[in-house]
């Protein structure tokens, strides 16, 4: 693949994510967990969170590595200026694309899925999602169990209508989130 084709693919994925800008949410009061810390969820690689059934295409990116590449900085600054990335983070619960260790963009016949791993504030992300929805239809806190039988980190799910379309988000603790 030519370097410009690779950059076009990367830029297209980021532009699609920026254009969708639908991730955010509202959180309730946080309580300190009791007992041993929860077992980590299986979130690496993030591609494992994208269902293969009905998949049209999938792009798996390492944004933090891409933005750290000295050779790519000039091209990236043309496609994604710092100001635009800062604005994106402000509008999307503080999610800074430059700080994501992995970003998966998957499209299906009637939906798109964004899965991100990296630095973000789950409470802020949840609050932003709630604020962006015209109608929040529900919130659930799923408690999972690790293969060892130990409790796993909880998953916060929210769903509702944003910009006239159904959207939902799953927040996997402080480690990852998925937006459909």
Image (tube, helix red, strand yellow):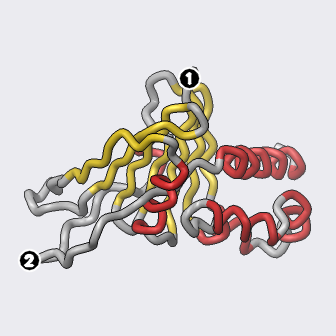
- How packed mark 1 is, by other alpha carbons closer than 10 Å (few <14, some 14-19, many 20 or more), is few
Image position of 52 with respect to 8: above or below:
above
Of callouts 2 and 1, the N-terminal one: 2
Which residue is more in the foreground, 139 or 156? 139
Q: Quadrant of residue 96?
A: bottom right
Q: Which mark is residue 91?
A: none
Q: Which residue is mark 2?
A: 35
- Residue 141 placement, left or right of 27: left
Which quadrant holds residue 40? bottom left
Q: Nearer the viewer, residue 67 or 25?
A: 25
In the rendered image, the quadrant that contains the N terminus is top right
- Please determine whether, in this image, residue 76 is positioned above or below residue 3: below
Residue 73 left/right relative to 124: right
User: Where does residue 109 sit, x and y in percent of width and height?
Assistant: 57, 21
- Is disc 2 placed on a helix, strand or loop? loop
Q: Residue at 64% of width from left, 62% of height from top?
A: 91
Q: Residue at x 29, y 55 (%)?
A: 155
The reply, left or right, for residue 158 in relation to residue 83 is left
**Mark 1 element type:** loop
- Residue at 49% across, 22% down: 54
**Image spot of residue 44 (x, y percent):** 41, 57
Q: Is 34 placed left or right of 122 in the picture?
A: left
Residue that badge 1 annotates:
110
Residue 128's spot in the image, x, y percent?
51, 59
User: What residue is drawn where x is 45% and y is 57%?
Assistant: 25
Q: Residues within 10 Å of mark 2 (few under 14, many from 20)?
A: few
Q: Residue furthest front?
A: 134
């Amino acid at each position: 693949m030519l370097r410009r084709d690779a950059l076009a693919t990367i830029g297209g994925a980021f532009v699609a994510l920026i254009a969708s800008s639908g991730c955010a949410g509202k959180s309730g009061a946080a309580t300190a967990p009791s007992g041993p810390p929860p077992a980590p969820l299986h979130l690496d690689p993030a591609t494992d969170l994208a269902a293969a059934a009905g998949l049209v295409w999938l792009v798996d990116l390492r944004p933090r590595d891409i933005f750290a590449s000295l050779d790519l900085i000039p091209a990236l600054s043309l496609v994604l200026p710092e100001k635009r990335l800062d604005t994106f983070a402000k509008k999307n619960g503080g999610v800074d694309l430059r700080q994501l260790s992995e970003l998966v963009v998957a499209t299906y016949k009637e939906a798109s899925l964004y899965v991100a791993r990296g630095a973000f504030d789950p409470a802020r992300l949840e609050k932003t999602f709630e604020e962006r929805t015209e109608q929040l239809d529900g919130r659930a806190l799923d408690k999972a169990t690790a293969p060892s039988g130990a409790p796993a980190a909880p998953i916060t799910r929210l769903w509702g209508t944003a910009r006239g379309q159904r959207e939902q988000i799953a927040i996997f603790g402080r480690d990852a989130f998925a937006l459909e």
